[in-house]
Amino acid sequence: MATVITDRSSDGSSPFDKDDTGLNRHVFIACMIAALAGLLFGLDIGVISGALPFIAKEFGLATHTQEWVVSSMMFGAAVGAVGSGPLSRKFGRKYSLIVASILFSVGSLGCAIAGNPEILIVFRVLLGLAVGVASFTAPLYLSEIAPQRLRGSLISMYQLMITIGIVVAFLSDTAFSYEGQWRWMLGVITIPALILFIGVLMLPRSPRWLALQGRHVEAKQVLALLRGCDVSAKKELEAIRESLKIKQSGWSLFKSNSNCRRAVYLGIVLQVMQQFTGMNVVMYYAPKIFKIAGFASTEQQMWGTVIVGLVNVFATFIAIGLVDKWGRKPVLKLGFLVMAAGMAILGTLLHMGVTTPVEQYFAAFVLLIFIVGFAMSAGPLIWVLCSEIQPLKARDFGITVSTATNWIANMIVGATFLTFLQVLGNAQTFWLYAALNLVFIFVTMALIPETKGVSLEKIEQNLMKGVPLSKLGRK
Ligand code: BGC
């Protein structure tokens, strides 16, 4: 879930939505289309778990090649995330989204008709590029067109769309699994990709990007359309121009300022933690895990996977409800604890041998508890934290680095799971993830700041004064 909030002024508010006129038709349609990009992101994460067993069978794939079929997409996404900063700056958010939707369409179609694993991997990389570009650009676009009052909920909606995309992919995989039609599983995503392409063509350009290019007349026209009021549009444009006076100088600040480096490193640590919880092991290999837990039929494995996806969607609401009540740290610590317990118990069950139906269902239940642990905490919260800790001048740079880290760590997890099962053993692999989650509780206590209710300006002041990372939220 890539939340990129780059438009906040240092007091934590949007610099350009002071005269909020609410959610009119144009904003609504634009948000729906950007959210469709989130759905596609989720579809592409979710689709591979159900398709993989059939692909492996048809091509007779070795473990290692299977891992590459999965993780080639994350490789593409890491490259896409790095490239999308310059792309969306030079050509604009709208054209970046057009590029992403073309890549989504070509990638999905290419995967569906791939005649051998090599071609499949090439098209998975292409799909990854689309996911990387979309995961950076869509939330950015959303945050630049949404009125301030609605921005928080629109960005949460984007995150929710990703989890919904995952579950829809699991469902469609299940429907096609009866006949083992993996090509349809992968190919059907071309339809939402084409809808996105057509939709994006109709989007207005981001007013903030237009202003960045000095195209103020056009920026004002778009704002007038979005806000339905000329006076608001004029004021908002002034606020945008004011905020643009702060030039992004991430790389030079990173090189020259050790405090800025601390924030970038913290972003890296946060994203590595999110991925090394092992969540995507479940997202990509759920049917395999159900198989290890004794669910022998494809039908059981597929429906188990659908339930995993549904629990992921619903538990995300727990995070949305808790994050501003309890704060980030307590929710994260609880989440890591729940995930550690889930992985530890699952490992122990596998160690003892899962044979009776009661044991099987208990193993599935424990897996779902793990999912709840992730979705209520690290899933959404890591993205929120990553966008809060970067100093304003280096925000674009910091978020690009942390987003790329997310995909690289994601790729490592996807590319090692099956090998771990073979080399370490089933139980030991889950214990490894349990141990990592335990370590993350201590990392959270030692390094992660509590940012609830603290302005971005205060966080930045503390950072630049050299206050320890865990105290960055000190008022
Ligand atoms: C993570 C993804 C993961 C998804 C699952 C996101 O926050 O970044 O890697 O697949 O959550 O819901």
Image (cartoon, helix red, strand yellow):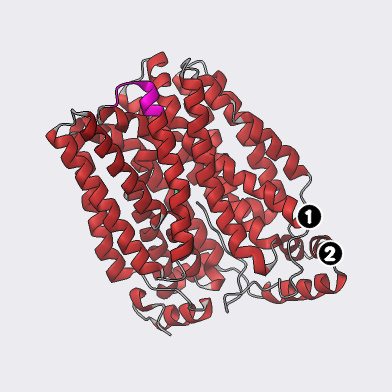
Q: Name the residue under label 2.
A: 228
In front here: 288 or 258?
288
Q: Write the residue at 25% across / 27% down.
A: 294
Asked where in the image residue 52 lies, by quadrant, the reply is top left
The spot of residue 74 in percent (x, y) is 45, 40
State which tag comes first along the sequence, 1 or 2. Answer: 1
Q: How crowded is mark 1: few (under 14 residues within 10 Å), some or many (20 or more)?
A: some
Give the alpha-carbon distance from disc 1 to disc 2, as whole Å.
9 Å
Crowding around mark 2 (Cα neighbors within 10 Å: few <14, some 14 to 19, many 20+) is some
| Quadrant of the frame with the C terminus | bottom left
Instruction: Pinpoint residue 400: horizontal percent, then vertical percent.
Output: 51, 57
| Residue 127 drawn in magenta | no
Assign a secondary structure to mark 2. loop
Residue at figure coordinates x 57%, y 63% from the top left: 5
Residue at 28%, 69% (x, y): give it: 445
What's drawn in magenta, residue-wise?
A: 295-302
Marks 1 & 2, CB-CB < 8 Å contact: yes
> Where does the image place residue 30, in percent across and percent down from the top left?
73, 52
At label 1, the amino acid type is His
* Residue 374 in picture, x, y percent from top left: 37, 52
Can residue 330 be seen by looking at this rendering?
yes
Q: In this view, does 297 lie above or below 326?
A: above
Which residue sits at x=75%, y=62%?
Answer: 207
Q: Is mark 1 on a helix, strand or loop?
A: helix
Q: Is the magenta stretch mostly helix, strand or loop?
A: helix
Residue 119 visible, this angle: no
On residue 26, which mark appears? 1
Q: Return the residue found at the far front.
A: 358
Q: Which amino acid does label 2 sit on?
A: Gly
Residue 275, numbered circle: none
Q: Please indicate whether residue 145 sits to the left or right of residue 457 in the image.
A: right
